[in-house]
Image (tube, helix red, strand yellow):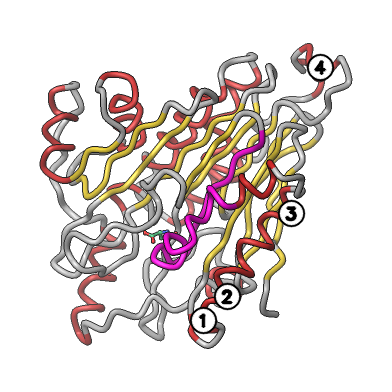
Amino acid sequence: MKKSRRRFLQNSLVLVPALGCAPLSYLNGEAKKPLVLSTWDSGVIANAGAWPVLQSEGRALDAVEQGGIAIEDHISCCVGLGGNPDRDGFVTLDACIMDEKANCGSVAFLERIKHPVSVARKVMEETPHVMLVGEGAQQFALEQGFPLEDGKLSPDAEKAYKKWLEKSAYKPVKNIERTQLNKGKGPYAPSMFDDGSFNHDTMGTICIDSHGDLSGMCTTSGMGFKMRGRVGDSPIIGSGLFVDNEAGAAVATGQGEEIIRISGCHLVVELMRNGATPQDACEKAIARIVKRDPVKAKDFQACFIAINKKGEHGAFAVHPGFNYTISDMTQENKVLDSKSYFS
Ligand code: ASP
């Protein structure tokens, strides 16, 4: 399993094409478009899903959906049906998507459906609503032709859940484990670490297409071992994701409750509208989270990535350990370490 994951990543690192097949916008000198940015190093999978759409001058919305599908397909990831379950042993999924016209769709507390990002898109396109949750979201997904999966935990998640049941302590600590504890073991963190702490790895993807339009998506199994029914920031438009085609796009990962308290991604985009660079905007939003409770902030992780209309990007986190993946016409997938409030 581990070997095949590594092989997939090695392959995905060469999926970004050489300049010989660059779209016209690049040849005209707009080097920053198209551009796709995803949370974490597992963003190489999402970006590899999104890139073919962008490369063929497709729509940002289609690109981010393909990014979400690619990561949800990856059963060993803490996203989609392979993720950690809630404390009662059920995997519950949250996702949302937003396009350049502020059309948006979202699902939360969705069970046994493999591609919540695509269900979210259907909510956006086929209903008069923005958000469907729980049984209603599942019923809608089935009506739309999504198959009902068996609901079994992935082998990694099952192992982590059994271990978690020994103490049943909700202990999501910080995401710092990803690069610090997992050093040398490849880009994926296991579902649970030896000290009993566990990971939470929302996949957020934002992009600008060759026409200059922005879109974003966010997909997650949420915090592992959460209370049944708990929903975090990820499916909430304005908290886990926000796109404004005039100003920019932002997506979040980390402790959802803290991100919701400041309507995080809306704040990041609004700061960009008022002139902040994506980097400044992410830093200001993280500072606002920390300022609310600097003591508590020592124990949780929260992170933003953002892009603006010019194709500039930024990232910032409460703690070290957050990284993100960027792909554009000038480079292969590049995993970058984010700066953070605390060092
Ligand atoms: N933001 C997600 C949530 O709170 C978790 C994560 O990013 O890993 O559900």
Question: Quarter of the image holding residue 127?
Answer: top left
Which residues, given as a range, are shown in magenta?
Answer: 247-267
Label 3: few (<14), some (14–19) or many (≥20) C-alpha neighbours in 10 Å: many
Q: Which mark is residue 45?
A: none
Mark pair 2, 4: CA separation: 45 Å
Q: Nearer the viewer, mark 2 or mark 4?
A: 2
Q: CB atoms at circles 3 and 1 under 8 Å apart?
A: no
Amino acid carrying label 2: it is: Val
Residue picked out by circle 1: 293
Residue picked out by circle 4: 20
Q: Nearer the viewer, mark 1 or mark 4?
A: 1
Mark pair 2, 3: CA separation: 17 Å
Q: Position of residue 164 (x, y in %)?
A: 25, 78
Mark pair 1, 2: CA separation: 6 Å
Q: Position of residue 94 (x, y in %)?
A: 31, 47
Mark pair 1, 4: CA separation: 51 Å
Question: Quarter of the image holding residue 202?
Answer: bottom left
Q: Quadrant of ligand 1?
A: bottom left
Q: Nearer the viewer, mark 4 or mark 3?
A: 3
Residue picked out by circle 3: 279
Residue picked out by circle 2: 290
Residue 4 is left or right of residue 311, and the answer is: left
Q: Earlier in the sequence, mark 2 or mark 3?
A: 3
Mark pair 3, 1: CA separation: 22 Å
